[in-house]
Amino acid sequence: VMTALLRQDFPIGAIEVILVGSREQAAAWRARWGTGTPFARVLAVEADGAHYYALKNEGARHATADVLAFLDSDACPEPGWIGALVGAIERGADVSAGITLFRGDDGRSPDDPLLQVAAAISWGFVVPRHAGPDAPPAGFLSHNVGFRAATFRRHAYRTDLGRTCAGSFLFASLRDAGERMVLEPRQRVAHVFSPGWWVLRLHRRFGYEVLLLRRLDTASTRL
């Protein structure tokens, strides 16, 4: 992912990178990126025991930029990713949702027809449910989303539900507060894919989260 960030069609010296993980991970990141980085800065933050959404909040807490862009370590951004995301925020959006493609763990490109079909499960979470240029996204995936920093800090991810549901609750909070959300199709990442992960983990996790959301708060999530 760091290599992909270096290839962005965007001024590298304007990008601040916040890496959040375990103590061992943070030490390795500091050894690799602690000096001579072309980025504005690379900060490695220790968050031992933190779950997925707590890691996101911790990264945002340390960021100093006006725009926050969230990635995962297995979601590789295309060269135009950060430029598209920042452009959407500069044009007035509070939140910019991107498109996720899949890349094979065997080296297959996101252009592979099978991977295009498999990625449709991700598109269904973000593609607007209504036609029109101002139609908001149906949701966002937390490995490919950007926020106006002040907007995110007014809402942030819930951390009381562990690794589940917080993205949906954040989307509902933003929507109900009237924050402007857009789908930016040029904001694309390629998430690593394997058949076992897609069938046994991704579908089961999505299904479980939908079930849990309906039990927790049907009025808020409106699923």
Image (cartoon, rainbow, N blue to C red):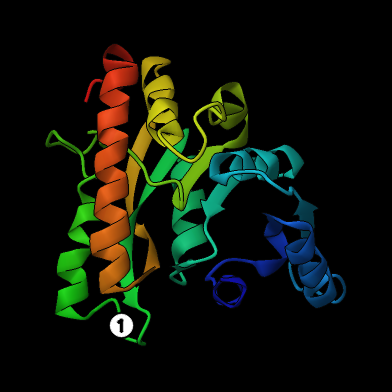
Which image quarter is the C terminus in?
top left
Does residue 117 appear in this view? Answer: yes
Element class at badge 1: loop
Instruction: Answer left or right for 194 relative to 82.
Output: left
Residue that appears at 45% across and 46% down: 142
At horizontal 58% and vertical 70% (from top left) the residue drawn is 5
Residue farthest toward the right in the current orientation of the protein: 35
> What is the quadrant of the N terminus in the image?
bottom right
- Residue 12 placement (x, y as % from top left): 66, 68
The answer to which of 14 and 106 lies nearer the viewer is: 106
- The amino acid type, in three-letter code, at marker 1 is Ser
Query: Is 95 drawn above or below residue 14 in the view shown?
Result: above
* Residue 67 appears in the rendering: no
Relative to the observer, which residue lies in front, 213 or 62?
213
Indicate whether 51 appears above or below 13.
Answer: above
Instruction: Check the image and name the residue furthest to the bottom.
Output: 107
Q: In this view, does 9 lie above or below 164?
A: below
Q: Nearer the viewer, residue 125 or 149?
A: 125
Residue 95: x and y in percent read 45, 37
- Give the crowd class for mark 1: few <14, some 14-19, many >=20 residues within 10 Å: some
Q: Does 173 sit left or right of 70 as displayed?
A: left
Q: In which quarter of the image is residue 80?
A: bottom left
> At which x and y percent is residue 13?
72, 65
Question: To which residue does mark 1 refer?
Answer: 109
Residue 141 point in image, percent of width and height = 38, 46
Q: Which residue is drawn at 37% across and 62% down?
A: 188
